[in-house]
Amino acid sequence: MTPFNTNFGQGRSREGIRPDMNWRELTKAGNIYEPGNANTYETGDWRTIRPIWNKERCINCLICWRYCPDASIISTDGKFDCFDYKHCKGCGICANVCPTHAIDMISEDEIDKQKEASKNEE
Amino acid sequence: MKSKVALTGNEAVAQAMRQINPDVVAAYPITPSTEVVQMFSSFVNNGQVDTEFVAVESEHSAMSATIGASAAGARAMTCTSSQGLAYMFEVVYVAASMRLPIVFPVVNRALSAPINIHCDHSDAMGIKQSGVIQLFSENAQEAYDNMIQAIRIAEHPDVLLPVSVNYDGFITSHALDVLEILDDETVRNFIGEYHPQEALLNTKEKISMGNFDMYDYYFEHKYQQVDAMENAKRVIEEVGKEYAKISGRSYGLIDAYKLDDADLAIVVLNSAAGSAKGVCDELRAKGLKVGVLKPRVFRPFPHEAIVDALKGVKAVAVLDRAETFSTLGGPMFLDVRTSLYDLKADIKVVNYVYGLGGRDLRLEDIEQVYNDLADIVKTGRVDKFVRYLGLRE
């Protein structure tokens, strides 16, 4: 038999995977060897509507924090801190469950347009 | 030590499974494969194996449980036929894509409807693009030998793919055959103790299997499977040579029978190859230059070996025991004809679909095929390149 360690070929990368890796470098069958790696996969660019926090209305009940399916509500010292826009997919669950309507969902297109407009003003 | 015994194909395969002594077998009965699992379950009951036997509620569950066991780190097997394999279909892809070395006999039977329990290869051809290695067996001896070798092929680190061992329903599965069985220790030494590279139950190394892929990774993972299939061709030959040392029987990718100087060749899988060899011998005695090519491996398709074996012939008939309903012929015909295209040789390649639903392939039918090929060579004309052998027209 061919000693297999000389021809191990594909899929032995244990350094985490990146989209610029070729098929030899990627792990066999997409197996994952490091826990917690979902953090490196940024899903924020899937978002078409963006949650915006209204500080005045927020009572820091953190119901949004419990409901967010992507752990994209960041809390500090038991209080609402910010959204993790790198991972927030814009599902709007936080806005829906908020008892004081302290989260508005704004179209990303609208935000882009506003940015564009403010640039032109400058 | 080897012993000569009289066994049916199913008995021989059940004996192979007893000698392999897998950690887990999950299966659901279906004719004509039922006996394999039935006999194996008696081995479990009698304490002749250490296997955890899972009596599941369907073939979909059978393969799913086998996948779970294999991913957990067990040497896991199942067994099925026909509708059972069809019902397994989606999970067969999962077994292959997760790169799990599951060995499972497939006792070839026609697919419904009309419901039919007899032999053809429609079941196996349904999974030919699933990523599973497919070995075919002419008789009980080959079914037994393929089972033992399949373990080594599937578990080879350059392969890591499921292997299905095909043999003809009733013709091979239920007919009594004389064959040589190796002793248990020889088999156990040959297959070795199973040490999976990766296992969900290995608490020392973290792993997550069966993950989600997007367009940025899926394509590469599919290509890894292609690469493994390419490696499998080498590994199958290596394992075959090594198996010859313990059994005296050597196995390659194809079985080329009297092809060296042949003008006319028949390409056929499984038990029909035995009949074709018989007719071939009779015609050879009359001075006709005929031969038989029996692919032992259908997936990966051993196109290099087939082209090499057929490069000198003038006409080839590919016999398919399955339809594709493409109106372009059977599944193996397409592969053989495509393989020969780049030779740019004037080899006429025709197709015969035969034996659907267990229709007998008579020796006269095979002789007719050789006669047709001789006519084609003589006239240089092919009237119909897809024909139906034994069909009432």
Image (cartoon, coloured by chain):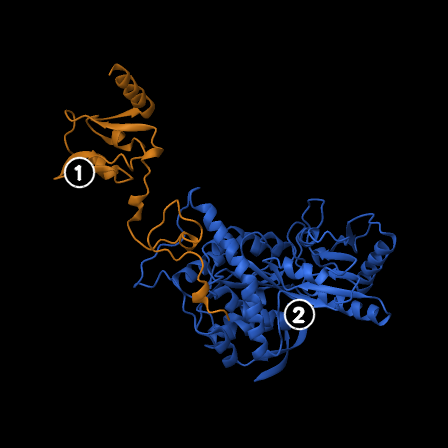
Chain colours: A orange, B blue
Q: Amino acid at mark 2?
A: Asn
Instruction: Give the letter of the chain under mark 2.
Output: B
Q: Is residue B272 visible?
A: no
Where is residue B346 drawn, in percent x and y?
Answer: 77, 53
- Density class for disc 1 (Cα within 10 Å; few <14, some 14-19, many ≥20) is some
Q: Is residue B282 left or right of residue B154?
A: right
Q: Amino acid at mark 1?
A: Ser
Of the pair B305 and B102, the residue shown nearer to us? B305
Quarter of the image where one finds residue A91: top left
Seen at 29% across and 52% down, the residue is A35
Query: Secondary structure under badge 2?
Result: loop
User: Dot 1 corresponds to which residue?
Assistant: A75
Q: Is residue B164 left or right of residue B326?
A: left
User: Dot 2 corresponds to which residue?
Assistant: B139
Q: Is residue A110 left or right of residue B254?
A: left
Seen at 45% across and 67% down, the residue is A4
